[in-house]
Amino acid sequence: MSSSIPLSLRRKVVIALDADQVSPATDDVEATTQSRFLSFKTVAWCKANILRPTHDHVFLITSIDPTAIFDGGVLSAMWSSLNGTEDPHGDRVKMAETALRRLAESLHSVGVSCTIEVLRGAPAEMVTEYVHVHRGEFLAVQVVGRSAVAQALALGWPEVCARSAECPTVLIKTGDLPENIGSVLDPTPE
């Protein structure tokens, strides 16, 4: 008879996904599918290489920055609702919650306990604060390729998280993940 480890005693693993991958700012179905698949592969890689289903609890998070002026999704929403009173980030938050919920269901199907949260604010600050508040013991951050100019000008939010988080951190470059990594999230037949 196996006993379950109480949630309070499990290792707390935070997986931070790029908001542009979880809820892309495009109406292109193919691009949206590809972006979400990169997030799925990131979570699958964590399951294969980091997570211990009976000993870990996963916090699956993303952060949407309401102050990001050049955020394509926000600009599009602002343009389409110039006379409206809707929050331009509202739809993006709902999209992110839906995508995270689906990823959490994939983790649940293979026995990993998981909670989701969409944070609002600059990802570098919000993710490190979240890790601190929830006493995260391990942080896995999705890294999406950036242009050479952007890399030369400043560190991206994943690199800032790696430097300032109060726990061991791994940066997961989505471009280097194998195509078949998603199979680790297939539930085993009973």
Image (tube, rainbow, N blue to C red):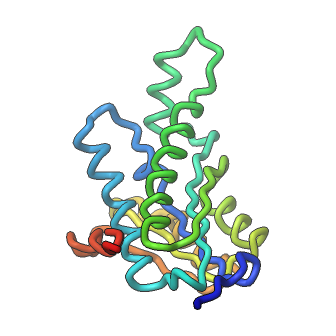
Query: Residue 156, image x and y in percent?
Result: 50, 64
Q: Is residue 152 visible?
A: no
Up-down relation of residue 96 to residue 4 (above or below): above
| Residue 145 lies in quadrant | bottom left
Residue at 72% in and 79% down: 6
* Relative vertical location of residue 87 with respect to residue 98 in this rendering, above or below: above
Front residue of 141/149: it is 141
Residue 19 pos. (x, y %)? 49, 51
**Horizontal relation, residue 150 to residue 67: left or right:** left
Regarding residue 20, the answer to whether it shows in the image is yes
Extreme-top residue of the structure: 83
Q: Is residue 6 left or right of residue 148?
A: right
- The one of 6 and 169 positioned closer to us in this rendering: 6
* Residue 33 % position (x, y): 28, 47
Seen from the viewer's position, the closer of residues 110 and 78 is 110
Question: Which residue sits at x=68%, y=68%?
Answer: 128
The residue drawn where x is 21% and y is 72% is 180
